[in-house]
Image (tube, grey):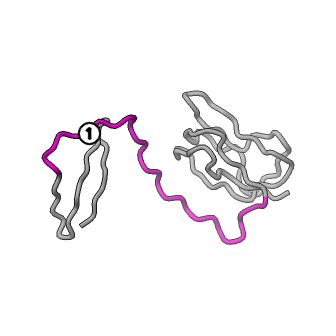
Amino acid sequence: MKSYTITVNGNVYDVTVEENGAVSAPAAAPRRAAAPAAAPAAPKAAAPAGAAGNVKIEAGAAGKVFKIEAAAGTAVKKGDTVLVLEIMKMETPVVAPEDGTVASINVNVGDMVEAGALLATLNN
């Protein structure tokens, strides 16, 4: 058996799933979530081996990938927009921290990212 916690419309349910596919849930009333949990992010495609650069570009805040401005192989200058995140309904550019070439883009448009998530890498 495996136990899961599932949130539906702000209500949290503890569910146990048996190997044969039968589902059982406690008869108690659902407990209220403090805040709705974000849906799990879809698995990311792995970057090709050796494609990661030596300069990391990370998300400064949680948000949604709105637009990707630079593809792998694109030369960028410090301050050039690499991608745009939608944070609290505002489009927020994520810029290159230094001159270099985009080595990898580690997210896709529509992905939800947490603060500190690796978005892209550069080679300088």
Label 1 amino acid? Arg
Task: From the viewer's perspective, tell me whether residue 4 is left or right of residue 41.
Answer: left
Q: Quadrant of residue 19?
A: bottom left
Q: What residue is at 63 percent from the left and 47 percent from the top?
A: 116
Q: Which residues are magenta?
A: 26-54
Q: Is residue 4 above or below residue 65?
A: below
Q: On the image, numbered disc 1 is attached to which residue?
A: 31
In this rendered view, identify the residue nearer to me: 93 or 32: 32
Q: The C terminus lies in which quarter of the figure?
A: bottom right
Q: What residue is at 68 percent from the left and 42 percent from the top?
A: 83
Residue 31 lies in the magenta-colored region:
yes
Q: Position of residue 15 (x, y in %)?
A: 23, 54
- Characterize the local packing of mark 1: few (<14), some (14-19) or many (20 or more) Cα atoms within 10 angstroms: few
Q: What residue is at 69 percent from the left and 36 percent from the top?
A: 93
Residue 88 lies in the magenta-colored region:
no
Q: Position of residue 33 (x, y in %)?
A: 34, 37
Q: Secondary structure at mark 1?
A: strand
Question: What secondary structure do most residues of the magenta stretch adopt?
Answer: loop
> Disc count in the image?
1
In this rendered view, identify the residue nearer to me: 69 or 122: 122
Q: Position of residue 11 (x, y in %)?
A: 28, 38
Q: What residue is at 17 percent from the left and 58 percent from the top?
A: 23
Task: From the viewer's perspective, tell me whether residue 83 is left or right of residue 64.
Answer: right
Q: The N terminus lies in which quarter of the figure?
A: bottom left
Q: Is residue 60 above or below residue 23?
A: above
